Amino acid sequence: MKAASVSAPGEVVLCCSGLHRYLGRDEGRVHVLKGVSFEARRGQVEAIVGPSGCGKSTLLYLLGLLDQPDGGEISINGNVMSNTDDAARTAARGAHIGFVFQFHFLMLEFTALENVMMPMRKLGRLPEPEMTARAHSLLASVGLGEKSHRLGTQLSGGEQQRVAVARALANQPTIILADEPTGNLDVKNSALVFDLLTRLAKENGQAVVLVTHNPEIANRCDATRPMRDGLFV
Amino acid sequence: MSPNLRIAFRFLTAKKRAMVMSLTCIVLGVGLFIITQATTTGFQDLFIETIIGADGAVLIQDKIQSARTSFETEHGSGVVIETTQDNAVKLQAGIEEPAGLVAALDDNPAVVGVSQVLKGSVDISSAVRSDTGRVYGINIDQHLKVSNLGAKIVEGSVDDFRNRPAGAMIGRELADRLLIGLNDFIQVSQSGATPQRYRVMAIFVTGISAMDRERIYLSLSDAASVLHRPTGVSYLQLQLADPARAPVESARIVDELRYNAQPWQERERSWLSAFSALQVSSAITVLVFTLIAGVAMFNTLAMIVIEKTKDIAILRSMGYERADVTRIFLWQAVIVLTIGAVIGCVFGAASTYGISKMPLRNGGISGIFSAKYYVVAWDVWHYVEAVSTAVVMVMLASIIPARRAARLEPGDIVRGTAQ
Ligand SMILES: Nc1ncnc2c1ncn2[C@@H]1O[C@H](COP(=O)(O)OP(=O)(O)OP(=O)(O)O)[C@@H](O)[C@H]1O
Ligand SMILES: [Mg+2]
């Protein structure tokens, strides 16, 4: 189970054990996650790989506290967060987790800049000018410095995805969960996004967990967790 | 600007057509509410002003010895006698010794004027015609304090009436029926008695046709002579500093002075209830618009909630709370409401102004009051009521979609299983 790591592993910031998740109702009820245990450490980039439908996104929603497990436990920074109340999970999402969805990345009526500023505004840690500056620099680091004032609708799928990555980084979360963050990107931009995530993990000690179908990306991660049929193998 | 308000604004502008629909309904609801209240209240206020101006805020008619049920009878003599009857106890009509009562009333700071009036039915004839009418004997200076008769004179003047002996003031309609004008002479008599001659010193138009058709004002002493009532008066007409307090003051007069006092609200009860029925019925009609505004807002928001579920999931994933989601949708209602209320008030005020410049058909209304143009009332409460009705309706309608949006689970949304 222990993955090979390139750099020295930091403290565990995200930890789950024995996660079960059923989806669907009645006859359609499917046992999607069958007791998944997993941990993510500061400064580590972990890849979850596996065939389509094996439950990677389902796991990521649970880890991102967007969904609640039917069994098992999730703790973030040492605090058990699964099955706590909505307010506590929401606060943890805002302060500690950056999430990149597999589909539907942006709020399309807003510009790229506004999208990136959205989580900062909610958290309210920075004054407005600093928020703007930070959002600009994040967009520049995903190669969209020129397009920060475009509306979501005026960006390509790959561009939207990169804005979503920048947005996930906005509040400097301890944990970055990204569901195929390079899925729509060409080689160059894939590398750009991946390098950015790796650099952040190393420099800021953030824990990065990403789902990917791209073997090259997976190989460059600190650890790869192959998944099949709702279990790590 | 709070992030929630910012998001609300953007969501709304993405759904312009639905928003304009809700907005229009709010504007119509608020505007029409104001217009109908302004016009119905306008006519009602004019009516109240007219009747208080003509007959004062309170009439004191007879002395109380038991309970108060009064009715008016016209005796063969032609003198109008108001009798109060309760369990067969008859009361003497009118006020036999007004002086003491007037003195007591003058001490009441709420009373700004008291006028003694002696009235009775008479036959009136001019050189060419004769007719019946009613004589009102007054002390003109007393009476000007309790009525606006002075302002209703259209020909001649109060001074002429005051200064010339044997002068009369006569209603326009009565004068027209008798085919007489200013300075003409009339003969006034109680049926059978010797007629006495008076000269028309002033002609008045109150707008109340019952008055303009039958009233002749004489001096108190002239009336006493015509009506053969050397002492006493028929009633006292009172004006109050605050006519709205007429019922309270009347009750005090009844209690303290033991005289039957009738406030204008009671005197004109049937007209007043007709006015308020009109006001209520127009408010109900207009309420329908506000109701539609509520439904339209509900519809708009429900639509936006469905279209923006993914955005709700994104917001929730970034740490926006359920309460934030509720607020984002309530803000949208507040934005539309604010714009709608402002436009609605402006629309209401502009239309009210326009209506007040509109001439009434057939040269105007007369009868219970006279008006040549639509009468409107400017009252800030109409605006407050209109806006608060819209606020209540629209906010109530918005709570449901807003809470529905807040209840959505981000996990369900991203899997597409949210409903
Ligand atoms: N609402 C649902 N009801 C029943 N089964 C569901 C439901 N949603 C998803 N599933 C099933 O759960 C399984 C896991 O889905 P999940 O989205 O986690 O897969 P994934 O590993 O992310 O796949 P992909 O690589 O294609 O994104 C799939 O087999 C899917 O069919
Ligand atoms: Mg997936």
Image: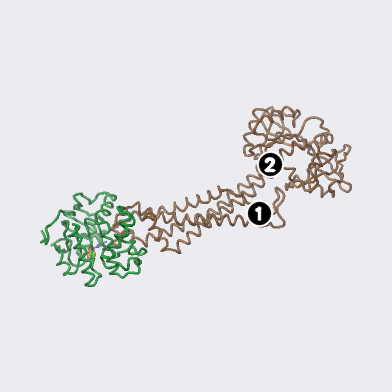
State the residue position of label 1.
Answer: B374
| Quadrant in the rendering for residue A187 | bottom left
Helix, strand, or loop for circle 2?
helix
Tell me the distance, in whole angstroms, between the alpha carbons under discs 2 and 1.
20 Å
Percent position of residue B181, x then y: 84, 48
Q: Is mark 1 within 8 Å of ligand 1?
A: no
Q: What amino acid does circle 2 point to?
A: Ile
Which of the chains is green?
A: A
Percent position of residue B66, x then y: 67, 28
Q: Decide: is B265 above or below B253.
A: below
State the residue position of label 2.
Answer: B52
Say which residue appears at 43% left-offset and 55% top-offset: B333
Q: What amino acid does circle 1 point to?
A: Tyr
Q: Which colour is chain B painted?
A: brown
**Earlier-in-chain disc, 2 versus 1:** 2
Q: Is residue A27 left or right of residue B180?
A: left
Which image quadrant: the C terminus of chain B? bottom left
| Quadrant in the rendering for residue A206 | bottom left
Q: Decide: is B172 above or below B189.
A: below
